[in-house]
C-alpha cells in the first residue's frame, strides 16, 4: 500500500504538475554538500553553480530572469522536475499546503502571476478534519440509548 502523499506527488491532479512557477521565481540555493560531488550528496553537481564557499544554487536561478535548469515543460500548463528524486532541500521543503491544510499564501501569490487559480484546501487533510466529523474526542461517554 502506498502513502497518500506519494500518490498525490505523482498524481495528475497534483497542482505542481501544472504550475512550476516557484521554479522560475526563487533562487534555489542550498548547502554545497547536497551536490553529488560531495560524499553522500544527491543533487547533480553539473546542474549547480557555486554562490560562495558554502552555498550552491541550481543553474538558471541566480539571475534576474530565473528558470531552474531541471524544470521541463511549460509553466502554468504542464511541467515536471527532471531531478525530482534528487532535488535540493529548498525544493523538498517548500510547502504547497501548510500543516493545517490551507494553501501556502506564497504559492497562491506566484500562481496568480501566471494566471492560475488559487489552490483549494488540501486533499490530504487528516481524517479528523473532514467536515462533519468531530475534531476533538468527546469529553463524556455517549448517553445510553
Image (tube, rainbow, N blue to C red):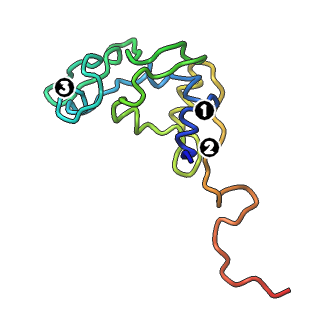
Of callouts 2 and 3, the N-terminal one? 3
Secondary structure state at the residue bearing disc 3: loop
Residue carrying label 2: 122
Is 135 displayed left or right of 31 in the figure?
right
Mark pair 1, 2: CA separation: 14 Å
Q: Position of residue 73 (x, y in %)?
A: 52, 13
Is 26 displayed left or right of 98 in the figure?
left
For the C terminus, which image quadrant?
A: bottom right
Labelled disc at residue 11: 1
Tell me if mark 3 has few (under 14), some (14-19) or many (20+) residues whose alpha carbon lies within 10 angstroms of its own: some
Of callouts 1 and 2, the N-terminal one? 1
Tell me if mark 1 has few (under 14), some (14-19) or many (20+) residues whose alpha carbon lies within 10 angstroms of its own: few
Q: Residue at x 36, y 13 (%)?
A: 64
Residue carrying label 3: 37
Q: Position of residue 102 (x, y in %)?
A: 59, 45
Q: Position of residue 130 (x, y in %)?
A: 69, 55
Q: Nearer the viewer, mark 2 or mark 3?
A: 3
The front one of 62 and 50 is 50
Amino acid at each position: 500500500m502506498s502513502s497518500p502523499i506519494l500518490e498525490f506527488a505523482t498524481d495528475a491532479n497534483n497542482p505542481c504538475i501544472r504550475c512550476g512557477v516557484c521554479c522560475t521565481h526563487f533562487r534555489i540555493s542550498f548547502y554545497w554538500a547536497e551536490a553529488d560531488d560531495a560524499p553522500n550528496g544527491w543533487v547533480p553537481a553539473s546542474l549547480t553553480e557555486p554562490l560562495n564557499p558554502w552555498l550552491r544554487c541550481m543553474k538558471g536561478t541566480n539571475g534576474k530572469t530565473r528558470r531552474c535548469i531541471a524544470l521541463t515543460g511549460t509553466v502554468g500548463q504542464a511541467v515536471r522536475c527532471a531531478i525530482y528524486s534528487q532535488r535540493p532541500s529548498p525544493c523538498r521543503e517548500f510547502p504547497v499546503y501548510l500543516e493545517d491544510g490551507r494553501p501556502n499564501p506564497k504559492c497562491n501569490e506566484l500562481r496568480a502571476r501566471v494566471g492560475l487559480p488559487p489552490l483549494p484546501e488540501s486533499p490530504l487533510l487528516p481524517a479528523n478534519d473532514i467536515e462533519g466529523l468531530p475534531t476533538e474526542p468527546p469529553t463524556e461517554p455517549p448517553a445510553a440509548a
